[in-house]
């Protein structure tokens, strides 16, 4: 008679990390492809694509779970990024600036289709004074100083 002893494996197995596995059964690369494809097709269509092209079986519930996990991570990252650039974090002390008023800048751009010329890149920039005004904070119900743009000036260019 042979007795085989099986030890339970720790939940965070070093082999999982070595294989590049994330939570669950899928590698990081496959999990990313699952999320990307689900943004383009229905879950049912994604299952068919993975079966035909990827030669792997993926369930609709697994696709949904990956999208929920990645979506939560993206929301958390966006919220963290927003806290890093909020006006409350900016030093609004005019004495430490090289202008008498604190200035703000913004940039944006996009593609515009011009008749008989085709698509052109448009770039827009803005410069404005940052002023503090008392406003009611929705969370606390108290009045606090909030930053606002005033005396806004815009500039736009086409192409380079």
Image (cartoon, grey):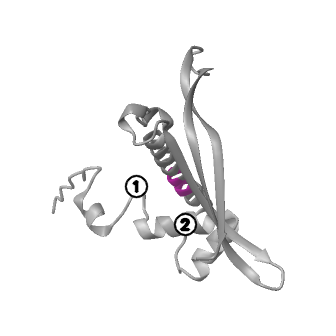
Which residue matches tag 2? Answer: 34
Using a 10 Å C-alpha cutoff, classify the residue at mark 1 as few (fewer than 14 neighbours), some (14 to 19) or many (20 or more). Answer: few
Q: Secondary structure at mark 1?
A: loop
Which residues lie in the magenta part? Answer: 65-70
Using a 10 Å C-alpha cutoff, classify the residue at mark 2 as few (fewer than 14 neighbours), some (14 to 19) or many (20 or more). Answer: many
Question: What numbered label is drawn on residue 76?
Answer: none
**Picture mark count:** 2
Q: Residue 114 occupies which quadrant of the picture?
A: bottom right
117 falls in the magenta region? no
68 falls in the magenta region? yes
- C-alpha distance separating marks 2 and 1: 14 Å
The residue furthest top is 142
The residue furthest bottom is 116
Residue 113, percent from left and from top: 77, 76
State the residue at coordinates (57%, 67%).
36
Residue 3 in the figure: left or right of residue 89? left
State the residue at coordinates (53%, 80%).
55
The reply to whether residue 30 is in sight is yes
Rendered-image quadrant of the N terminus? bottom left
Sequence-first tag of 2 and 1: 1
State the residue at coordinates (56%, 52%).
106
The prevailing secondary structure element of the residues shown in magenta is helix
Q: Secondary structure at mark 2?
A: helix
Question: What numbered label is drawn on residue 23?
Answer: 1
């Amino acid at each position: 008679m042979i007795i085989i002893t099986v030890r339970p494996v720790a939940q965070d197995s070093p082999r999982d990390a070595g294989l590049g596995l994330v939570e669950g059964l899928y590698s990081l690369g496959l999990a990313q492809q699952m999320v990307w494809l689900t943004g383009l097709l229905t879950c049912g269509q994604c299952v068919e694509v993975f079966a035909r092209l990827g030669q792997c079986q993926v369930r609709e519930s697994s696709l949904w779970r990956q999208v929920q996990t990645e979506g939560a991570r993206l929301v958390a990252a966006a919220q963290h990024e927003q806290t890093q650039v909020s006006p409350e974090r900016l030093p609004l002390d005019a004495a430490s600036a090289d202008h008498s008023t604190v200035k703000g800048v913004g940039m944006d751009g996009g593609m515009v289709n011009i008749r008989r010329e085709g698509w052109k890149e448009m770039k827009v920039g803005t410069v404005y004074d940052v002023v503090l005004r008392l406003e009611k904070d929705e969370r606390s119900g108290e009045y606090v100083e909030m930053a606002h743009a005033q005396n806004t000036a815009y500039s736009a260019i086409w192409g380079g």
